[in-house]
Image: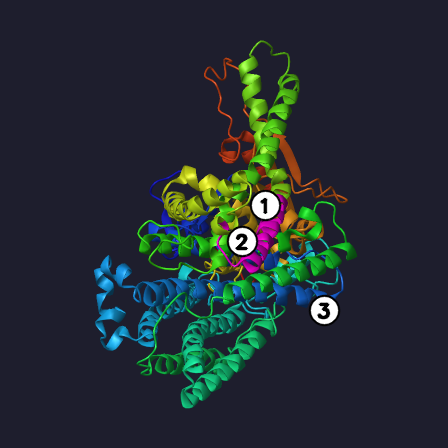
Amino acid sequence: MLDDPRAVRITGDETAAVYRRPDDVDAELHPERYRDRPIPEAYCWSHLTSGNGSRALWLLLLPFMVVNLAHWMRPATKGLGKSQRLYGVLVRLVALTLTVLLTAAACEVALDLTAWQCAGSAECVAHRSWLGFLSADRHGWWSQPGRRLALAATVPTALVGLLWFLSNRTWSAYEAQRPPGDARPSVRIRPTAPESAAPDPTAPDPASAASASAAPERPASEAVRPALGRPGFWYGRRLVARLRAAHTAAGFLTVAAALTAAGAAQDRRAGSLPLAAAGVLLQATLLCCAAVVVWVVCGRGRSERRRDGSLDGLLTTWLPEGSLAVLALAVVYAGWSRPDWVSSGAAPGDQVFRVLALAQVALIVALVVIARRLHRRVPQPRTAMRGLGGPAVAMLACALGGVMTGGVAQRVADWLDGGATPGMGGGVIPGPPVLLSWQASVIPVLLVMLLVPAGVLAVRTARTARALVPVVEEEYGPVRGDTLRSRQVAGARARAALTDAVPRLVGVIAGSSLLLGAAAVAGSWLSGEVPGQAAQGTDSFVESVADTAQAIGSWLIGLGFILFVTWGRRAYRDPSARRTIGILWDVGTFWPRAAHPFAPPCYAERAVPDLTWRIVAWTGRTGGRLVLSGHSQGSVLAAAAVWQLPATTRHRVALLTYGSPLERLYGRWFPAYFGGGQLAQLSGEVHCWRNLWRATDPIGGPVRVPADGDRPEVDRGPLTDPSAYSRTVEHPLPEPILGHSDYQADPVFAEERAALLDRLPPPLLPPQRDERRAQESSGRSSA
């Protein structure tokens, strides 16, 4: 942005910082240099979302990020406070089932497939020498099934501990960033202070009385702020800590339940009253602890109207530690000597996956009912999927979790079974639970079903491109004969319009996932067999389809894991890939972790306070005015930062956005936070706002805020792209189709920035000014 490789860091650290050109470092001391031009300054936040390629491993927790998005997709409404709270509770419960599902999958792989089935089979151990010390045939100390399970429990326990560590570590780096406070006492401005000693941004702007008189009159209800403008929105440390404690406890309790179920089943068969009584007592303790976890998750959510300065210390400390103590008791219970215990078949407790699937279906259906009620109260025509975007995305999270769980279990079973298809007979181990085989088998079926909407979109895009060819030629004037050029431009516009078809595609995927998931649960429940065996004796075509789906399902999920990690690393390292892959990741990690504490961290909880502090500190120290410009996701951060500013500061800030998804993506999918009313309110709070967009841009678009009184329409566009249709004297070589890139190279950008600076009120001079103070307070800046 600064177009200078020698950019100097003004404030910040290696993760996120503000930069200037070397010649502009001391701009405030030399205002005579900037009478006719602004001071360009760039806030670089890319290291918050990129950097080390190992961060791509966050993609393996994609279901957690997706369900967290569903929390913020609540339809915009008025009133219905109980329904709004119930919506949040349901999403948090869906998120809790995903944590239990992940832990149960780890238990299935480590405890059931490895320690119970393979270690209990002499033929399986013969091909796995590293399992020899667990073999039942060797009659060693670890040969008893309970002790094998207790040892294998270290794997899911370590996984839960790792998730807790990552969540706690990123919480310290992101959620712990305090934004400017809502208390703004009057302080005296000290313009001679160095840059590092800027005044507290909680203070008002300099000469606040003059600022208030110079600013246009605003509505009296300043206390009624949009959600993103509330003091506690970007400071959700208390809720994240509560959820982290609950989900960590849920993970530990899931492992403890797997151990206890196996031991209790053996004690009931053997008729050992003391151990059976201990098992019943331990199971009752697990139920009580699980009830506490659910109570914590269903408890009070985010308090955005004020900052949560305190933590529930007793809860966040004792809940994970107490569940870990219960897990330790379960390990002792399972490892107790039972000489006659022999492992055969699958380990007890495989019904947990069926229960989780049914619970997720019930929660999604309830979420649909609540979302529909909220949307019908205040319907907004441009809301994605008529308010059902949140339930659809939550369904996608559950589908991802189920498919990944079933695929991993199938792949490990294939590996341990020496190539035999799990559950089909003839193998050395029984294989994973029947439901997981059904879930893995729906992957190829879902891919085939998606070919239909993909084909429809391809045909529609081709037709739209043909229809746009004469429109393009008419816009560029009397230029004819270059059919190829016209098709290129028309094709770029038609492909950019595909973004508006995403809600329908998401609806199709979510609906298909719900139907296939319900079919998998019903098929596993009614048949009790894997798809290949359940289809035996039916029509030959059906039998071959079932065998093929089951055979390739696990391989597809293995390929999917490889693609996830590969694409993730590429998105972090390759800027061109980041434009296509990274935008989805940036949207997913923009929102705070309000539903799932193990989701990837929210970079906006660091970036928005950074921007807010910088803007308030600079305007407070100099009395200057500022144009805050943002491209793509940066425009969303800019809008969020403006909402957090004090009123007098907002009136001295102009907003310039380009390639912005504020309305096209955020407004449609997150209507309660970026809907039409919120964007119109934002336009009224800043001094002036202009938005640039292109018809060839697949991400950015108009914000659809109309003119209001003396305020012009916010949007300017569509901008001409490409800038020249064919070769001319001014453009002897073909001009590229820029799409989402290089807005600043368009002359319209400099024109609109200059116009915004001219519309801003003149700089303020602090009281009791002297020559140096006057120099420091008369600069202009464009952030």
Q: Tell me the magenta residue range.
A: 506-531
Q: CA distance from mark 1 to mark 3?
A: 30 Å
The answer to which of 190 and 707 lies nearer the viewer is 707
User: Quick one: SS at disc 1?
Assistant: helix
State the residue position of label 3.
Answer: 82
User: What residue is at 69 percent from the left and 64 percent from the top?
Assistant: 84
Residue 292 at what x, y percent from top left? 54, 79
User: What residue is at 51 percent from the left and 43 percent from the top?
Assistant: 543
Most extreme residue toward the bottom is 274
Residue 175 at what x, y percent from top left? 48, 65
Labels 3 & 2 near each other (Cβ < 8 A):
no
As drawn, the label of residue 509 is 1
State the residue position of label 2.
Answer: 399
Residue 529 within the magenta-colored segment of the rendering: yes
Residue 103 at what x, y percent from top left? 44, 66
The answer to which of 13 and 354 lies nearer the viewer is 354
Say which label, 3 or 2, has the lower sequence index: 3
Rate crowding at label 2 as few (under 14), some (14 to 19) or many (20 or more) other CA atoms within 10 Å: many
Looking at the figure, which quarter contains the N terminus? top left
